[in-house]
Amino acid sequence: MLISLSNAASFLKEKDNFTIITHAHPDGDTLGSGIGLCLALRALGKKANVINDEEIPPKFRYLEIEPQEFEEETVVAVDIADVTLMGKGIRAKYESGVDLSIDHHGSNKLFAKMNYIDASAAAAAQIVYELIGLLGVEITPQIADRLYTGISTDTGCFRYANVTPDTHRVAAKLMECGADAAKINVRMFETKTRTYAALERLALDSMQFFYDGKCALITITRDMFAQSGSDENECDGIAAISRQIEGVLVGVTMRERRDGTYKASVRSHDPVNASAICAKLGGGGHPNAAGCQLPGTREEATKLLIDTIGEFI
Amino acid sequence: MLISLSNAASFLKEKDNFTIITHAHPDGDTLGSGIGLCLALRALGKKANVINDEEIPPKFRYLEIEPQEFEEETVVAVDIADVTLMGKGIRAKYESGVDLSIDHHGSNKLFAKMNYIDASAAAAAQIVYELIGLLGVEITPQIADRLYTGISTDTGCFRYANVTPDTHRVAAKLMECGADAAKINVRMFETKTRTYAALERLALDSMQFFYDGKCALITITRDMFAQSGSDENECDGIAAISRQIEGVLVGVTMRERRDGTYKASVRSHDPVNASAICAKLGGGGHPNAAGCQLPGTREEATKLLIDTIGEFI
């Protein structure tokens, strides 16, 4: 059932003993919006915890808060578009037991009993900001830091097409409530681990161009992971690099898996459709960001991928 | 003389035939605020041009507008803190002839007859937004794109400590007036020339660490410029890289000049003071971003610089 935001607020005010669940591979928005909401519920005198299925990545640990002890009665999901995006443990326990889902993905599968979905919000944290207003809770600096983190990380620091005038207005309010925006941004956007920096260097060294510079390919081998001390978890940033080169319409990152086959992340600029390229290879995704698995050796995988891209540019 | 923004608006309303001057090595803010103001003055039925001392860098050419023909009567400076920051030709002609200066640098030398300085504004374009409001001119999409460019480029896309709640509020208004924020941000922040990407790769290859990883050094030689096809104009982005590595307190980029000596850009995190380091070597700058010239060969320059940094960490 779809409900209004004020109905969601009324529901939260009536209930108590909340478990707020976040999605697998937790990011700044699921954690920021979940923990921000948790703090607001606690400010109303309620018991509330946020749970994740895996350890919180070191870069997001500043968002964490102490858990409380209580017997769970109400389950809220934040920033989870589908039960398949829950971690295994959370899915096993909560797949059909979510009371209220708060999300900003237009693709949300409405898996909860009650769902509030606003696809125009750049981040779940932008919705939670409005929701906390309806709860009548004052936004403390602690809450503001968490919601700001959600918004800034989901928008590439106000860079992406999902940013609306409201996104900026909420950011302004959160700064006034005490969000330490500059410090959060340094941590989120201006800090690289040494292992990531080493991997990035090897990735740049591997870059090849095809089709008059319209396609750029980065290849990351197991050997490069070993050499840099980095791993798959640090690959997300790399995928963005090749598309940034002037003239490149399709930027691809191929990454070797443990079994020696390759996984490709494809990023494109309009009018090239990354999702169509990956669909032809058995994968899928969004129009400008998609992925697929590739069979064969590095040489075979490269040839298949580059030939397929050639049909689209 | 310091004046209020409404006095500045009255002055602009009274006068006509404007030349708006911008600073040397023009960036998004001097161009965006200058051209935005120029369009607003033209909307009032006045004649106005923006002039630069050198060619506008390719990445900013989308800001350009057609010049008008008229005899210059009034000179306005935007985003220029001091006459030494004017290009040679502009300085020769306008050093003592600026009627009104609009700026956001606290260090502004008040070189104009009338000066409006707001050091709390993240960008000159943020001031020009308020000024255009006082002029009673509607912000067209064309003006909005230019002011948004000024604000986003001077704040690292809302990332830096100079961003205030007002900066976000102005960005929200500019988007509502038609600024194509996402497109501008791709152009400003998600696009690298191939020559820059090649230089960046060589720069990363050159990175060395000192003092338990607290200092990172990138060295760019003439040979690397030749190899990459890049040049000094593309070095700005490189200077930010070394400080981004986790654990690094001082990130340094040394760049070989035509005469074989080196110039250093020093970036620091608190509490290390980059300006104090550079002052000891005869240079200067801001607390977290400073520069200096170094005598001697690459080896001599490196030793002098690293030894000096050692005294500060």
Image: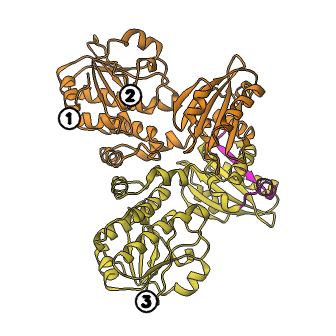
Chain colours: A yellow, B orange
Q: Residue at x 53, y 50 (%)?
A: A186
Q: Is residue A92 magenta?
A: no
Residue B192 visible in the displayed image: no
Q: Is residue A225 magenta?
A: yes
Alpha carbons under labels 2 and 3: distance apart: 58 Å
Q: In the rendered structure, which disc, 2 or 1, sits on the residue that comes first in sequence?
A: 2
Image quarter of residue B135: top left
Instruction: Give the residue number, with chain letter if any, for mark 1.
Output: B134
User: Subunit of mark 3?
Assistant: A
Residue A138 against residue B249 in the figure, above or below = below
Category of crowding for the residue at label 3, using alpha-carbon neighbours closer than 10 angstroms: few (below 14), some (14–19), many (at least 20)? few
Alpha carbons under labels 2 and 1: distance apart: 19 Å
Indicate the position of residue B145 as horizontal and vertical percent values. Answer: 37, 38
Instruction: Give the residue number, with chain letter if any, for mark 2.
Output: B79
Indicate the position of residue A187 as horizontal and vertical percent values. Answer: 55, 54
Looking at the rendered structure, the secondary structure element under dot 1 is: helix
